[in-house]
Amino acid sequence: QVFTKDFVGKKTTKTLYWANQDSKSKEVMRILANPEDIQSAQKEVERLQNEYSGLQKDLSLLSKEMGNHELTTMVETEEQCVSSLQTQVQAIRDRIKAKQEGQQLKRPPLTNRFGFQKPKSAAQLAREQCPHRMKIRINAMRDEWKKRKEKCADFIDQLADGMEKKPKDVIKLLDIDTDESEGAIMPAKYVIDVKK
């Protein structure tokens, strides 16, 4: 509210203007918020800022993750790798089987012209049943078993490194029969007495 007052002089008249400060201050106090509202608003602003920061972090993580196209490409690549490894394993199994069959063909049983197996002589039977020779043959077969097992274990370890998996997972994935799964236990090596 503005007040005016005229001052009349001999020659001129002056008008004085002034505001009613009391009435305006009351209006301003009604407009201004109280401290409780200000504190509540500040807490709400802080909460919204924290929520905004959390959303920014989530958005950053989502932007770093791979999309569906990248995941599909990766899965297809891994499937091709597994298929290639399965093909290699099957080829190795076929070679082992062919080698075993070839060894069996190279050593046919002794037969006569009528197709019947020739009876073994007493010397042959004695030689086969000799404990000393039997231990030597068992040790030779045991050594061959051990060599093949070590080669297979080394192959599976390299395969696991290439696939970035554990050897147990590779064995399960390729359905490989191991000595442990079949309950086969390697016998102890015989100590051969050297004949003087």
Image (cartoon, grey):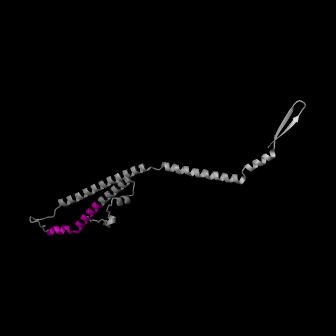
Residue at the spot 87% in from the left edge and 31% down from the top edge: 12
Q: Residue at x 29, y 59 (%)?
A: 148
Task: Name the spot of residue 76 as percent of width and height, x first.
Answer: 37, 51
Q: Relative to 10, does residue 140 appear above or below in the rendering? A: below
Name the residue at the left extreme. Answer: 113
- Note whether 19 is above or below 181 in the view shown: above
Q: Is residue 131 left or right of residue 111?
A: right
> Could you say which is closer to the camera, residue 23 or residue 106?
23
Q: Is residue 7 above or below residue 63?
A: above
- Quadrant position of the N terminus in the picture: top right
Quadrant of residue 141 in the image?
Answer: bottom left
Which quadrant holds the C terminus?
bottom left
Any magenta on residue 192? no
Q: Measuring 34% from the left and 51% from the top, which residue is drawn there? A: 80
**Residue furthest to the top:** 11
Residue at image location 19% in from the left, 67% down from the top: 127
Quarter residue 110 falls in: bottom left
Q: How many marks?
A: 0
Residue 143 in magenta stretch:
yes
Which portion, as a residue range, is magenta?
120-145
Q: Nearer the viewer, residue 171 or 2?
A: 2
Q: Position of residue 108 (x, y in %)?
A: 16, 62
Say left or right for 93 vs 49.
Answer: left
Q: Residue 2: x, y in percent? A: 80, 41
| Magenta residues, dominant SS class | helix
Q: Nearer the viewer, residue 66 or 45?
A: 45
